[in-house]
Image (tube, helix red, strand yellow):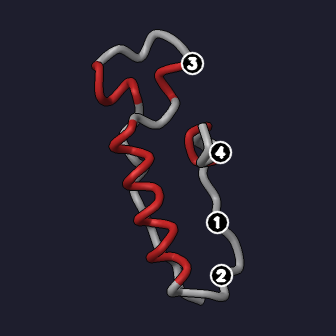
Amino acid sequence: MKLHFARHGQSMGNMTGDYSTDAHDRLSPAGKKQALRLAARLAALMPLFAIWSPLKSAAQDKRE
């Protein structure tokens, strides 16, 4: 079994330095681009057994 680790994309809180609301857990525009690049890299590793993250931003819809 191989494990691959990735750091989360930039959140709105990371961008602004304000972590006071749940809205700051959402991905920033740069974080969305980072997530798309990560998805492309992970696609090259198919098949994957599972992807896991405790962060809300990890499940954010790409259309948001």
Tell me the SS state at disc 1.
loop
Q: Amino acid at mark 4?
A: Asp
Of the numbered discs 3 and 2, the one sitting upstream in the chain is 3
* Mark 2 touches mark 4? (CB < 8 Å): no
Tell me the SS state at disc 2.
loop
Give residue 61's mark. Answer: 4
Q: What residue sits right under mark 2 in the picture?
A: 48
The residue at 65%/81% (across/down) is 48
Q: Position of residue 54 (x, y in %)?
A: 61, 44
Disc 3 and disc 2: Cα gap in Å?
A: 30 Å
**Residue 44 as seen in the image, left or right of residue 34:** right
Quadrant showing the N terminus: bottom right
Q: What residue sits right under mark 3 in the picture?
A: 22
* Mark 4 touches mark 3? (CB < 8 Å): no
- Residue that lies at the very extreme toward the top in this rendered image: 20
The residue at 56%/40% (across/down) is 57
**Residue 50 as seen in the image, left or right of residue 22:** right
Q: Position of residue 19 (x, y in %)?
A: 41, 17
Give residue 51's mark. Answer: 1
Of the numbered discs 4 and 1, the one sitting upstream in the chain is 1
